[in-house]
């Protein structure tokens, strides 16, 4: 008799989970993520984050999740879909001591396979020239996904933000490819500079009291990544990126066949594709 009661309870709970709508899951995810963000104790925040991930995994089991808009949840985390419709990201952060950040990112493929990234906190030598994978991901919050065809495969350029620490923020231009077996590689050499150097990702660091815009724009049949030029407020601070601020000029990358080519002192205003003021640290 006890065995049958257990089976009944299991089927009841399973039926309840399956009966929840995607809208109900969205509300539950928002509530759980708010608990994570407001919790000041690190260990408790990590435990609450595990609860959030359990709910997210349940929600992902619903086939309609891939195209569901998540208008409310997207105010608390990134839920962007790649423009080519190949994948969707669920990307959020946990603030640690000294305003350092821990990042989570799940990449949901069209077939609902989940690729989970691990925020790799160890120092990586020459990070802008390093190849990384799902287990050594340079964590960030992504707000823009740009697919480009290169040598018969799609390379994705990701624009992201990192709260870094109590002194500075970072903006990241990342490159990513996904194999046919859904293996992820970060760091494709597509960021070309006039001196001949080619980076696999580009990282900008700037003072917490300053701001930096980094946007993708299409104008005159060309694709651009446009960003504020950063500089130290005085020459003796040149080696201290925590102090860097914008000087109100712009630089850019322009897509040219297979790579992004760097353009210094880019005249963004003449194209009317970037307007001031801009003071949103997440975009």
Image: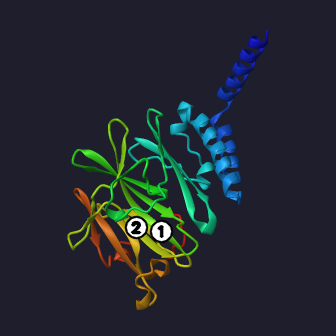
Tell me which label, 1 or 2, sits earlier in the chain: 1
- The local secondary structure at tag 2 comes to strand
Q: Position of residue 197 (x, y in %)?
A: 23, 68
Identify which residue is drawn at 62% across, 49% down: 73
State which quadrant residue 200 falls in.
bottom left
Q: Where 210 falls versus 151 (above or below)?
A: below
Q: Where 202 falls versus 267 (above or below)?
A: above
Residue at the extreme top: 1
Disc number at residue 110? none
Residue at the extreme right: 1
Q: Which residue is mark 1?
A: 170
27 lies left or right of 214: right
Q: Position of residue 232 (x, y in %)?
A: 43, 84
Q: Which corner quadrant holds the N terminus?
A: top right
The local crowd at label 1, few if under 14, some if 14 to 19, many if 20 or more residues have their Cα within 10 Å, is many
3 lies left or right of 185: right
Q: Which residue is mark 2?
A: 203
Q: CB under 8 Å between callouts 1 and 2?
A: yes
258 lies left or right of 206: left
The scheme the figure's colours follow is rainbow
Identify which residue is drawn at 44% across, 32% down: 111
The local crowd at label 2, few if under 14, some if 14 to 19, many if 20 or more residues have their Cα within 10 Å, is some
């Amino acid at each position: 008799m006890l065995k049958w009661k257990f089976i009944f309870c299991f089927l009841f709970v399973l039926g309840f989970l399956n009966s929840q709508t995607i809208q109900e899951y969205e509300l539950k995810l928002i509530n759980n993520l708010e608990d994570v963000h407001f919790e000041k104790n690190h260990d408790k925040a990590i435990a609450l984050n595990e609860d959030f991930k359990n709910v997210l995994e349940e929600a992902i089991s619903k086939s309609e999740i891939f195209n569901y808009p998540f208008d409310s949840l997207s105010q608390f985390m990134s839920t962007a879909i790649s423009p080519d419709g190949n994948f969707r990201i669920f990307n959020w952060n946990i603030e640690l001591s000294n305003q350092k950040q821990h990042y989570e990112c799940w990449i949901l493929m069209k077939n609902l396979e989940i690729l989970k990234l691990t925020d790799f906190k160890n120092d990586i030598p020459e990070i802008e020239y390093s190849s990384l994978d799902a287990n050594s991901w340079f964590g960030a919050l992504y707000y823009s996904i740009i697919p480009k065809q290169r040598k018969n495969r799609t390379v994705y350029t990701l624009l992201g933000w990192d709260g870094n620490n109590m002194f500075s923020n970072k903006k990241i231009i990342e490159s990513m490819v996904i194999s046919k077996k859904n293996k992820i590689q970060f760091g494709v050499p597509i960021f070309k500079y006039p001196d001949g150097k080619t980076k696999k990702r580009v990282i900008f660091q700037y003072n917490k009291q300053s701001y930096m815009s980094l946007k993708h724009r299409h104008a005159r049949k060309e694709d651009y990544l446009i960003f504020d030029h950063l500089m130290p407020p005085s020459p003796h601070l040149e080696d201290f990126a925590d102090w860097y601020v914008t000087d109100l000029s712009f630089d850019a990358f322009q897509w040219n066949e297979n790579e992004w080519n760097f353009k210094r002192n880019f005249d963004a205003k003449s194209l009317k594709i970037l307007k001031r003021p801009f003071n949103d640290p997440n975009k």
